Amino acid sequence: MSTKIRRIVAGVSGLAATSFLAGCAKDAPQDTWQPKGTNAKIIDDLQQPVFAIAGVIGVIVTCVVVYCIIKFRDRGQAMPEQTHGKPALEIGMTILPALILAGVGVFTFRTVFDLSKTSDTQMVVNVTGQQWWWEYDYPAQPEMGITAPIITSGQMIIPVGTKVLLRETSRDVIHSYWIPALNGKRDAVPGRVHTLRLDADKPGIYAGQCTEFCGLSHANMRMETVALSKEDFAAWVANQLADAKSPAEKTLAKEGEGVFLNQCVRCHQVNGLKKADGTPAIAAPDENVWSGAAPNLTHLMSRNTFGGASWDLLNKKCRADVWGASSETVGKKYLAGVSEECLNQTDLRRWLRNAPAMKPMYADPAKLTSTNGKYRGMPNLGLTEDDIDKLVAYLSTLK
């Protein structure tokens, strides 16, 4: 075998080995081969045989190609006899792939119809995408214990064993919602509402990613679904329905509340927050943000992430403890929220110091002509280190 042929064979073998090993990660957060919900299992039931069929065909084709390369390589021999037209072979090469595709197509169509079913859902969550984060709006649903609307972001909380209807849309450009362990992708399109059924068969935290390129920080538009037992979900709902409590007077957190009122309430709502005159502080993101919305921070420390679920509020040790928890204990650990000892102050302070430096956003005041002066993302607020100390102290109380 010539050196050239050896290199070709080695290259093909290396590529095949690399492709195989790339799918061998264990417990990867976005592993599509470990379904944990009804729709994800329906998808898995289709993709497993399709990949198997494609793999067998791929191996056969690769072997034939390699054989032909070696067998019929140029050795200086005379030109072989040329033939034109092999009806039986050509008909067979046409019919066999057609039959394979038809068989796969039948099962694919059945799967598509199964995935589109939403008549058996028991709870509704409105999911809205905007550059570059997801908002979750839970309408009042007394049968689920939700007696008033709940609005949160970053992490969607659902009860285990409950089929949830997601009603997806977008406030700016097209996004796509995907939690691999729980369901397939569904686009969130401005002016439209697309539905998706989602459920989890056991408690846990399931990671996802926006899968439609949506601008500068598309890679930083992540999401997580937290599945809790029905008891833990009820506790979460009760906490979310409560207003935030004002910090005690003459504390650093109380001073931070003042910083928040001066700097942050222009965009971010905290339910129960009041101005100095006692009137409710109402955020006006529609006046400052291109999408017309900003994350509701009422219970910021009850969730584990910030910045569009791109950064953890928990430090590495505490995050590993929550994410590595068993299905029996993950609910209790998640509901504990972010304590002072577990708070990832490093990233939170960096964010408050200069958010656009961490997550590229259209937030340069000199470049807002196309958005009529409105930001697409959190700008650099020019906070002093003293302001940041106070603000971190206040945000830590929002549990």
Image (cartoon, rainbow, N blue to C red):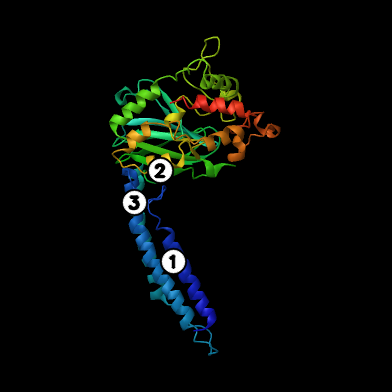
Give percent across and percent down for residue 132. 54, 37
**Residue occupied by mark 1:** 17
* Measured Cα–Cα span from mark 3 to mark 1: 23 Å
Above/below status of 33 relative to 257: below
The residue under the point 36% across, 26% down is 237
**Residue occupied by mark 3:** 44
Could one spot residue 292 in this view of the protein? no
Tell me, for residue 320, which label it has, or none. 2
Above/below status of 43 relative to 229: below
Mark whose residue sits in front, 1 or 2: 2
> Extreme top residue here?
277
Query: Which quadrant is home to the C terminus?
Result: top left
Q: Secondary structure at mark 3?
A: helix
Above/below status of 41 relative to 197: below
Along the line of sight, the residue nearer the viewer: 103 or 333:
333
Give percent across and percent down for residue 165. 36, 34
Along the line of sight, the residue nearer the viewer: 305 or 368:
305
Q: Earlier in the sequence, mark 2 or mark 3?
A: 3
Q: Secondary structure at mark 2?
A: helix
> Extreme right residue here?
366
Displayed quadrant of residue 360 = top right
* Measured Cα–Cα span from mark 2 to mark 3: 28 Å
